[in-house]
Image (spheres, grey):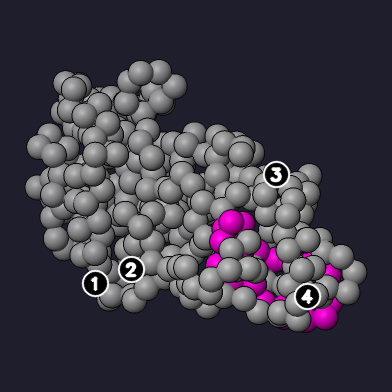
Amino acid sequence: MAPVLPLATTEVPPMTEPLAGTASEADPYRRNPARDVEVFALTVVKYWLGNRGRLEDTSLGHEPDFHIEYPDGRHAWGEVGWHEDPELRAMWSNAFRKEHHQQIDLAPGLGAWTIGLARGASIKRLYNELPAFVQTLSQLGCNRLSITGNWPRGEPADTARRLGVEYLHRVDERPDVAVFFMPSTGGVLLADANAVPAWVSTVLASQEYSDTTQKLLAKQADERHVFLMSGSRTPYDVDEQLRRLGKALPTHVPTVPSGITHVWVTSQFGNGPGALWIAGTGWSTVELPAPVSQDTRSAGAEE
C-alpha cells in the first residue's frame, strides 16, 4: 500500500480529530494505520462483491492487497492507497500516546489556553516544554501570540517557532490547561463533483503512488482495482465532495494508467457512500456496510 499540501487556516482551526479521554480507552491510533485502511477497503469491496465472487486478502505478502476470483474464471487484483501525510499521522499518533490527548496541564493560575500547531511539530517536545513557555508568556503579560513566517522576530516568537506553535491564546481563567489543535485543511468548497476524478488523476500520476499502479500492471488480470481513501493530504474541496457522493456523482473520466479498470474512492471521515469508477461504464455509488461507515483514523511511528 502506498502512502498534495493542505491549505492553512489562520484562525483557531476546527479539529480534524475529536478530543478523546485517556490513553486507557480503546485507541485506534495504537494500531497499524495502513492495515486499518486496508481492512476498511477490503470490507467495502467484499460487501460490494456479495456472492458474485470470492475476495482474498493478499496484503501481508508481496502481492497487491487483494485478489478477486469470479465464478466464470475471470480474476482481478486490487491495491489500496491512502492520501495521508506521514508527518501529521505521526503527530496524531504521538498525541494519542499521552494520558490526556491534546491537553497539557499548566501551573495553577495560568488559565486555559488554545494552541495551534504547525505541520511537523514535535508532540513530545510540546508536552515537555509548553508549560514553562506559557508561564513565561504569562509573566510577560502576553495572553495572545500569533506567528506568521518570520514575524514577529525575536522572543517569545522564536520559542514558539521552535515548538512548532502557530498561535497561542489565553481563553479563560480556568481550568489550567492548554488544548492544542493539529494543522487543519481549509479552503473554498467548489460545488463540483468532478473535483474527485481530477484528484484521482493527480494522485495516480504522482511518483509516490507509482508503486500502487505498477504492482497491479505487473499482474496478468481481467480487472485491476485501485482503492483510494482520502487523508490529510487531500484538498479540502475534494474531501468535501467525497462526503457528498450520495448527492452528486462525478461525470468526468479520471486519467489512469492504461490497464487500470476500476477506481474506488471514499472519504476518510465521511459516513459514505463511496463511489466506484469502471472503465467503459462510469461512476456509481457504493454503499458502505454498517461496521465500516465509521472513520478509520491514523497512527505513526513514535518520535
Q: Residues within 10 Å of mark 3 (few under 14, many from 20)?
A: some
Look at mark 3 in the image and give the residue it sits on.
97
Label 1 vs label 3: CA separation? 39 Å
Q: Earlier in the sequence, mark 1 or mark 3?
A: 3
Of the numbered discs 2 and 3, the one sitting upstream in the chain is 3
Q: Position of residue 3 (x, y in %)?
A: 38, 40
The kind of secondary structure element at disc 2 is helix
Front of the two marks 4 and 3: 4
Q: Nearer the viewer, mark 4 or mark 2?
A: 4
Amino acid of disc 3: Arg
Q: Are marks 2 and 1 in contact (CB under 8 Å)?
A: yes
Question: Residue 59 occupies which quadrant of the picture?
Answer: top left
Tell whether label 3 touches label 1 (CB within 8 Å): no
Residue 133 image point, x, y percent: 73, 63
Neighbour class for label 4 at 10 Å: few (<14), some, many (≥20)? some
Q: Secondary structure at mark 3?
A: loop
Q: Earlier in the sequence, mark 4 or mark 2?
A: 4
Q: Secondary structure at mark 4?
A: helix
* Residue at the (33%, 46%) spot, across then down: 228
